[in-house]
Amino acid sequence: MPRSKVKLAFIENKKAMKSSFMKRKECLKNKLKELCTLCGIDACAIIYSSYEPGLEVWPKDNTAFQNVLNAFLTKLPMERNKFMSNQDSYIKERISKVDGQIKKQIVTTRDFMKANLMSVCLSGKVSLAGLNSKYLNNLGSFTGHKLPEIKERIKVLKSDAPASQLQPPEPKEVVGCKCSSYRVTVAYQFCVNQSKSPS
């Protein structure tokens, strides 16, 4: 059974916080030991906490710890900070990632709503004449975005279907619509052909 994802949030209960700290501190030291052994690298850790006096370092061998720390401090600041991470940088990275996911979801939802609007219009449930300019422009931009796909589909269908089935209906002008009536007509014909073509 897969482990549940840990909720990254401040632990309000002080007893639970201390227990989590102690457990994760040992886990961190074990992971560092594994990393050094498996990958043949040098690593060290400095751990401060309010639960224990002073600080704790790993490895416990002071010479080994000091060698790693000195090697790090002798590097140029740019090289030292290249892969450095702290709480602020981690939170900023998470915010940026979530922000990107939100923007992507907004685009997906917007396209779904436009496709749904086109579907109800073509099914006759909603008349284009009853839509305001905002919805008509959204429908026009969505249809224009789909035009290459629509034209390709029409090209394929023309090679298989009789010419009588490919005659588009007469375009209708819609008052207040800035989008091309040709786009809506082509989209209508495309959907009609889609419904006639075998799945």
Image (cartoon, helix red, strand yellow):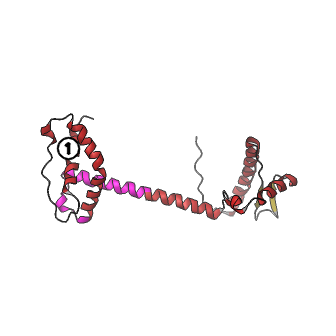
> Split into 4 quadrants, where in the image is the C terminus?
top left
Q: Element under label 1?
A: helix
Residue 20 % position (x, y): 69, 56
The quadrant in which residue 57 appears is: bottom right
Residue 35 screen position, x and y as percent: 73, 45
Near-viewer residue (193 or 91): 193
Q: Nearest the camera: 12 or 187?
A: 187
Give, as a single range, the part of the protein colored magenta. Answer: 104-133
Residue that appears at 76% across and 59% down:
47
**Percent position of residue 4, x then y:** 58, 48
Residue 111 drawn in magenta: yes
Image position, residue 99 (x, y; %) = 49, 60
Residue 123 vs residue 111, the one in the foreground:
111
What residue is shown with label 1?
A: 192
In this view, 8 is above or below 148: below
Q: In the picture, which quadrant includes the N terminus?
A: top right
Residue occupying image coordinates x 12% and y 51% = 170
